[in-house]
């Protein structure tokens, strides 16, 4: 199948490209800055805010994976207007480009952060893809942009018949991740012999997903069973910040830990079910957290690839 990946030079996007190529698909990478990390893919430079340019870049594809977006929550907060343009207007342009070029499917990269806006019912059960959202709880602008993007995708299905799949990513980690991400910061501090800094008590948890596991789900999402579905790609085991530090200590220690105030407006670690991904795609993460961190350390030490954002 001829697939297009916007943002395919980024952290997650580059691994999605690798997974699609390995599965035998033709891959066109569309990005505003080109880093040719996979020689088997075709690379096209385009700005998602330029509809004509983006439409030309998507031409000839059957399915588009739309990953191009502002993904750093701190950068979103620092430049909210640009974040809105990239994540909302950019998604609108990608949807229209997919419609004009006759794409069979539009696959949107969303996030488990949107569950922060889930309607509170007082229970502690895992949330599913069917949970209702309360827009008054959207909180961080990053969440608002992702909710808006999901709504636009749903509207294009209703108005124009554009088939879609929405993938809500768990918290990713692994080779090529941004230096600012917590796992990367801890590992790189340990390698440099510097103290590791923990925000708050270090009890906050995330269900981390190794990036190659996340990328594998995109290949599975090409299945007809994923058409017009929203699917959470959540990890299976909660990992606390303290556990991340302990993992890094076990691999690279001994380390020194310093404590600082917790970050404001952070994702609160709501419990999210990945049962639908297992049922529809046959997908669940297979890489344990310690093994995933070990692979990241090996990648850093090898120094063969440039880190991407």
Image (cartoon, rainbow, N blue to C red):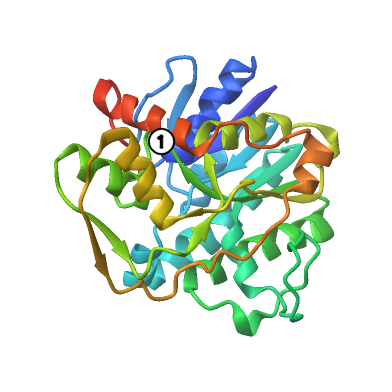
225 sits left or right of 156 in the view: right
132 sits left or right of 202 in the view: right
- Marker count (numbered): 1
Q: Name the residue nearer the viewer: 166 or 180.
A: 180
Q: Residue at x 25, y 25 (%)?
A: 301
Quadrant that contains the C terminus: top left
> From the viewer's perspective, is residue 173 above or below residue 1?
below
Where is residue 39, by image quadrant?
top left
Residue 140: x and y in percent read: 48, 74
> From the viewer's perspective, is residue 90 above or below residue 124?
above
**Disc 1, SS:** helix
Q: Name the residue nearer the viewer: 7 or 14.
A: 14
Q: Residue at x 44, y 75 (%)?
A: 265
Q: Which residue is mark 1?
A: 293
Residue 107: x and y in percent read: 67, 44
Q: Residue at x 64, y 19 (%)?
A: 25
Q: Name the residue nearer the viewer: 33 or 244.
A: 244
Most extreme residue toward the left is 193
Quadrant that contains the N terminus: top right
Most extreme residue toward the bottom is 136
Q: Is residue 179 visible?
A: no
Q: Is residue 177 visible?
A: yes
Q: Name the residue nearer the viewer: 242 or 105.
A: 242
Residue 228: x and y in percent read: 81, 48
Instruction: Mark 1: give few (<14), some (14-19) or many (20+) Cα within 10 Å.
Output: many
Where is residue 203, by image quadrant?
bottom left
298 sits left or right of 150 in the view: left
Q: Residue at x 39, y 66 (%)?
A: 76
> From the viewer's perspective, is residue 132 above or below residue 230?
below
Residue 212: x and y in percent read: 53, 31
């Amino acid at each position: 199948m001829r697939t297009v990946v916007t943002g395919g030079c980024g952290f997650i996007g580059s691994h999605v490209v690798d997974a699609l190529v390995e599965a035998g698909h033709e891959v066109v990478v569309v990005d505003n800055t080109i880093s040719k990390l996979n020689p088997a893919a075709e690379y096209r430079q385009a700005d998602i805010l330029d509809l004509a340019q983006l439409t030309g870049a998507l031409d000839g594809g059957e399915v588009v994976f739309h990953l191009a977006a502002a993904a750093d929550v701190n950068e979103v907060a620092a430049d909210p207007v640009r974040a809105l343009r990239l994540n909302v207007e950019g998604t609108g342009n990608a949807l229209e480009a997919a419609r004009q070029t006759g794409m069979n499917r539009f696959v949107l990269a969303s996030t488990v952060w949107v569950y922060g806006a889930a309607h509170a019912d007082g229970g502690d059960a895992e949330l599913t893809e069917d949970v209702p959202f309360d827009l008054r709880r959207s909180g961080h602008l990053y969440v608002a942009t992702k909710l808006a993007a999901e709504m636009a995708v749903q509207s294009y299905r209703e108005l124009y018949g554009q088939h879609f799949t929405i993938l809500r990513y768990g918290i990713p980690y692994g080779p090529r991740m941004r230096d600012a991400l917590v796992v990367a910061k801890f590992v790189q501090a340990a390698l440099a012999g510097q103290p590791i800094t923990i925000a708050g008590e270090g009890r906050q948890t995330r269900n981390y997903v190794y990036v190659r596991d996340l990328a594998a789900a995109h290949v599975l999402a090409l299945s007809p069973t994923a058409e017009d579905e929203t699917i959470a790609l959540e990890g299976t085991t909660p990992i606390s910040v303290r556990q991340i530090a302990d993992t890094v200590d076990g691999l690279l220690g001994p380390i020194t830990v310093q404590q600082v105030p917790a970050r404001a407006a952070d994702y609160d670690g709501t419990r999210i079910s990945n049962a639908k991904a297992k049922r529809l795609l046959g997908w669940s993460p297979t890489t344990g957290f310690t093994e995933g961190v070990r692979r990241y350390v090996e990648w850093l030490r090898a120094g063969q690839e440039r880190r991407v954002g």
